[in-house]
Amino acid sequence: MDRSKLYRRFRTLLIANRGEIACRVIRTARAMGLRTVAVYSEADRDAMHVALADEAVLLGPARARDSYLNVERLIEAARKTGAEAVHPGYGFLSENAEFAHACLEAGLVFVGPTAGMMTAMGSKSGSKALMEKAGVPLVPGYHGEAQDEATLAKAANQIGFPILVKASAGGGGRGMRIVRSAAELGPAIVSAKREAKAAFGDDRMLIEKYVDNPRHIEVQIIGDSHGNLLSLFERECTLQRRHQKVIEEAPSPTLNAAQRETVCAAARKAAGAVNYVGAGTIEFVSDGKDVFFIEMNTRLQVEHPVTELITGIDLVEWQLRVAFGEALPLRQDEIRLNGHAVEARVYAENPTKNFMPSVGKISTWRLPAETGGLRIDAGYREGDSVSPYYDAMLAKMIAWAPTRDVAIERLNRGLEDSDVRGIVTNIPFLSALITHQKVRANAIDTGFIERELAVLTQATPTPGELELCAAVAAIVNDERQAAQAEANSPWQTFGWMPVGRRQRSFAFRVGHGPEQKITLNYGSGPSTLVIGDRELAFAIAPRDGGFDLTLDGVKSQVAAVIDGHELYLRTRHGRFDLHWVDPFGGETEEQAGADKIAAPLPGTVVAVLAEEGATLEKGAPILTLEVMKMEQTLRAPYAGVLTSIKCKVGDIVQEGVELAVVEPSGE
């Protein structure tokens, strides 16, 4: 094939993606002088990536298959805007060989490997056969074409349990199940196939020996069209949950220099087996002694910034230069490893409720400045909405330092200084994770988060004296700022009263806990706060995102957000959510409906697991929903009879809709 059709100079780039990665690509492309085109769905009309691009094209409805996964509409968007090249980002169509081929057929440069390279390495089973021939070490497994249950069961028994049932296409933990016994195999295959089909349009499975207490090591590689192929050191991605990476770092603290060179050489050999062009990642699993090839991701990875920070290389820029047809600017021996970098993925999810995705409008978005070795790659801003249709990642926070310990400290400080409200995020969970003693000591494996989940998601501490005083200060500060907005208001001076001294009482509670009361004395003379039998001198000084609170001569920084009677505070003791009890009454208790079998978020019914009239034990599975690309099983809230199922497979249901009814047994 004429190489000029694959790689050539272009001026206009269409980014076939959304969110953080679209924003990331746009920034580098524009810095290189390229014109950028964004695409968006109806749910993303006001998204950040749309605002950043020079032009934006509406693809269609919110569902990904009608917009971001619609190849014809993407090609048409490129034609309409004069785009000469397409960057696929990660996820969606980034590893779809048909999309890469369609771009070529339309005369577009695809910023990534060719369709043939994707096909060879994108299939987990096919790539393993290729790696075996190339002499790359493999985990024992079955990678054959026969997909009937009997063949898969026979292979599993020959390999020996525990095994891993894994989708041949795709990644991100979808279509993957750990199976520890023959009895678990059948249901695991059915569930994994269904999830893989929905996520990737391909339900082929492979089976591997499951390595207990494994570590996940991956190597960043990049090749050009002139035969140059480089490895850019390795990343440790062992901290995972449900096979989804949570924290990534580079270089791996597990490997010594000799092991590093061995795994990087194996990665170059793996990529060289297909004469790879573009950015990609070779993934390995380690049992503590040896490493085994798992798969290749034929695209840029979410965690690529940690590699950029330790090498000083902009991987998106190198991707684009390779797509221009240029040779890589450095040789292997010219790439230097400098310091250590750690990345945390910030998600809209609730760790205390099984990481349930959180949707809604972001009312507050405060992240620290990108200084002192801290980098933030964000896809959202204050006022943006998180929809239920796509992956819930909001941003990535990455810290660099000369040493691992200092990088972790910088990352933790960045997380602690972040306040995102309106939705629930995993920021406190991330902070608890990276400060865990065993994480600091690198005494981890891929099952670490699941084992330590109770510790990592433990309830926030009870508000103390500082927090109650801060709650009053937040209300007073908010009222004063509102008054200052009114010209000539006597309330512009805090504590102004025509004469004398006044009192004001406040009451707060956490959840459904008891009320905690505090009294403010103000007017003529110093202001004080009274808690129980203690009276504290009190002063506040506003600043961005909160205020300085001085109690009896001790000054503390407080971050605060007020939404009606709901208060969020961040003090030196942590994060706190308090309810300000309405001083004029009118408090209402929310009817939780915990026993109601309802959709927790908008989703699609993918399986009905019980029949009407069935007698169920508490916790018995009733149906499965696909929510934000992940399956969630709804279970019986108590023992009883399933009297009604109000949905069927394929139904798209909205949040809160009742899906089934269980009548309790009365025991």
Image (cartoon, rainbow, N blue to C red):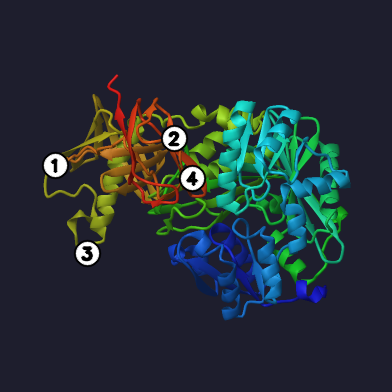
Q: CA–CA distance between discs 1 and 2? A: 32 Å
Dot 3 or dot 2: first in sequence order is: 2
Q: Is residue 436 left or right of residue 139?
A: left
Dot 1 or dot 2: first in sequence order is: 2
In what element is the residue under mark 2? helix
- Indicate which label's residue lies in the foreground, 4 or 3: 4
**Coordinates of residue 135 in the picture (x, y in percent):** 88, 43
Residue beneath disc 3: 487
Residue beneath disc 2: 352
- Indicate which label's residue lies in the foreground, 3 or 2: 2
**Coordinates of residue 56 in the picture (x, y in percent):** 52, 73
Dot 4 or dot 2: first in sequence order is: 2
Q: Is residue 600 left or right of residue 4?
A: left
Residue beneath disc 4: 417
Q: CA–CA distance between discs 4 and 1? A: 35 Å
**Coordinates of residue 102 in the picture (x, y in percent):** 67, 70
- Please say if 45 is above or below 279: below
Q: Amino acid at mark 1?
A: Phe
